[in-house]
Image (cartoon, helix red, strand yellow):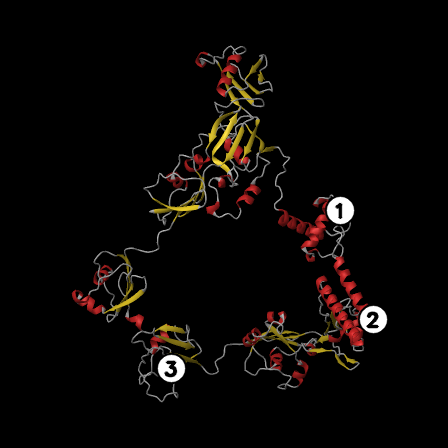
Amino acid sequence: MRQYLILIASLLFFMAATELSAQSFNPTDLSGVNVNELSEEQIRQADREIKDRGLSLSEFQQLAVAQGASQAQVSQLVSRIRSVRASGNGSESVISDSQEVRTMETVDVQPYREIEESGRSASQRVFGMSLFDQVSVSFEPSLNVPTPIDYTLGAGDEIVIDIWGAAEQTYRLSVSAEGNIRIPNLGPIYVNGLQMNDAENRILNRLTDIYSGLSPNNPEEGNTYAQVTLGSVRSIKVTIIGEVRQPGTYSISSLSTAFNALYASGGPDRDGTFRNIQIIRNNEVVETLDIYDFLVSGDQESNIRLRDQDVIKIDPYMNRVQLTGETKRVGFFELKDDETLEDLLNFAAGFTDEAYTRRLTLEGNTPTMRRVSSIFYPEEADRKLQNGDRVSVGQIIDRFENRVQIEGAVFRPGTYEYTSGLSLYDLIDQADGLREFAFLQRGTIERLNENREPEILSFSVERVMNDPASHDILLQPDDVVQISSLFDLQEEYSISVRGAVNSSGTFQFRDGIKLSDAIFKADGFRDNAAAYRVDVARRITDGGEVKGIRTAETFRFDVDETLSFEEENGDFELMPFDQIYVRTKPNYQTQQTVTIEGEVEFPGTYVLDSRNMRMSDLVEMAGGLSEFAYPTGASLERRLRDDIDEELEFLDEEERSDDLARRSNTSVGIRLAEALQNPDSDQDLILEQGDVISIPKELMTVRIEGEVLNPTSVRYDDSRSFRSYLDAAGGVTDNAQRGRAYIVYSNGEVDRSKRFLFFRNNPSVEPGATIVIPREPEQRELTVQERISITATLASTAATIALMIDRLSN
């Protein structure tokens, strides 16, 4: 026995190991593998195998699809591999390192900008770097501009010569690699390196050899005129080196400026200078670009036009200071050696409206540790700052130094200025005095003492106003004066009108309001109102009744439709919280309708003429059955009552089906033939509002639906059995729940198959019935992890039992 148990445990362990090893899959064979259930280690293993085979992800994707894997599986696996690579190895290079020459049209540096600046707060960003982060700002040179007179020509430029007057001609000439242009009938003209105005003079002087009427020096003396302009421009190569986001050589338009090239390269990186960018031409620094000049004042004087083989060199920053707090711009700012705190604030666009400017906090570095000092502004605005300094601007205290407030029953409540010697009487006077409903016996002043704890001072409003010399109170800053109104100190009085009125509800009580006034506020009686029975329920407040017996006093009145009382009653005056009820006339009913459809002489909608009108009465109203009617198959559709809908809301989700929740009607099984034979019997149902009776023609088919091979309708045959109808539909499917089959008769009644021991009793089949075969509920398949867990548990249990038996046997 022990040997058998050990063998079973071994087999279970082997099965668990087999399940685990099945997950170490071949990444090109994804059959039977759920990619979403693979662990991160298995994804890394697949990635290593793809790399060992020397495949790229796109090549692997093509190979896996070719071997029969679905496109969805392969896409999921590739997506997870890329996610693992990104989390484990950081971001991949956006642009290959072997790409040496770039163009402004093809280089995309936005990924670099997003990676470098993502997650940084405003106080951690370098001022100026956002200029190159804006996708909408590209600094691309405009080509639709007049020819710049200082433009220097070079190989590849196009020159357009227009001649008009006594002769007309247009030449479009390109500058050759040797720097020449060639005009027909003239020799080559060397223009390389010439500015546009110098090149124009040289070309016009040479054109006088073939156009005698051309006089470039004295145009008014000739009869032929000429103009030299620039057509298409050449491309130049510019090299950007140093602390730049994307260094390299760029091919750009010859009209481009330094900003164009800097934007193409992404601008300086986090360690690069924004104040001392050198433009080197022929081994000499021809210009030093300060980006802050453009950012602060819009000055582009140093933004010169570039030439072929220019070099832009960005050195590391030398002096960078951090500014935080209440300034319009915050972050790291680069300062030159001669710049001061005032320059820093200028770069930050000044203080915000809540800045505390009297003293700024400066944190700096010493050779061994950090230090803190205070800067008094503006006295020390010329203070020079050092690299690594941090300047913090605080916020003003959220407190008023000269504020008092008055609230409540005054004409102008609000906030007022405190001045020395301001008194309570003066403040009430500034608020235009007391309202008519002011409570004069008591007012309060909420005051903050020296340790800012609140305290309450009370006073007599009447005494202060009548004798301020004796009872006036001097105020202090932050005092809050509260003068209540009479309405604040009493409960809000109301009355309510309910019942057969046009606008029932609760209304505000007013002194002298009468019963007729309250009904008038409720927009008068409805048509079903019993005006001769109006009840008024009043609270008992005087305590005269025995405690615990009576809680309200009721008055009853007869009011006619003109809202007047009988003479002996007079008009009844209401009290606060009175509740008025206007009753409904007895036996008052609105017209209620039912509908009969199908095989009757006069189908349509009919009014219920009595509360106990039955189905037979309705058939009689409709002229009786037609000769084709099949009353056995008649059905009744009834609207669900509102109270039933409310009951359904309290059912659990399991107890209430979706179909029941959506339904507003329900079918009622009726037997109309028996009802017509025995009127007023139990089968002759009493009708309700909205009922719909449908009487069909004689039915001759039976419908089979649900889990059968071919849902269909077949001819009714009283000799056929329940099972033979299922055979007519091809039999049941493998998913059919045969034992729970049921039949819906044409009159709305339902019956189902029943089973007793080994015997099944199927319901009888009638014309017009529908046989329904339900579907077996779906069972969720265990996941791989669940199967492994169960197998391991069984194996562990078997091993434990084997061990116990072994010990007991020994």
Q: Nearer the viewer, residue 686 or 90?
A: 90
Label 3: few (<14), some or many (≥20) within 10 Å?
some
> Along the horizontal axis of the image, is 520 left or right of 779?
left
- Foreground residue among 596 and 554: 554
Look at the image and tell me whether residue 506 can be seen.
Answer: yes
Residue at numbered disc 2: 4
Instruction: Identify the element where label 2 is drawn.
Output: helix
Left or right, residue 74 beside residue 572: right
Q: How many marks?
A: 3
Which is more toward the observer, 807 or 546?
Answer: 807
Secondary element at image label 3: strand
Q: Which residue is mark 1?
A: 63
Residue mark closest to the camera, 1 vs 3: 1
Q: In the picture, which quadrant includes the N terminus?
A: bottom right
Amino acid bearing label 2: Tyr
The structure residue drawn at horizontal position 76% and vertical position 58%, both measured from the top left corner, is 21
Specify whether residue 140 is in view: no
Q: Quadrant of residue 447?
A: bottom left
Residue at (55, 32) in percent of width and height: 240
Decide: marks 1, 3 in contact (CB < 8 A)?
no
Q: Secondary structure at mark 1?
A: helix
Reading the image, the residue beneath label 3 is 537
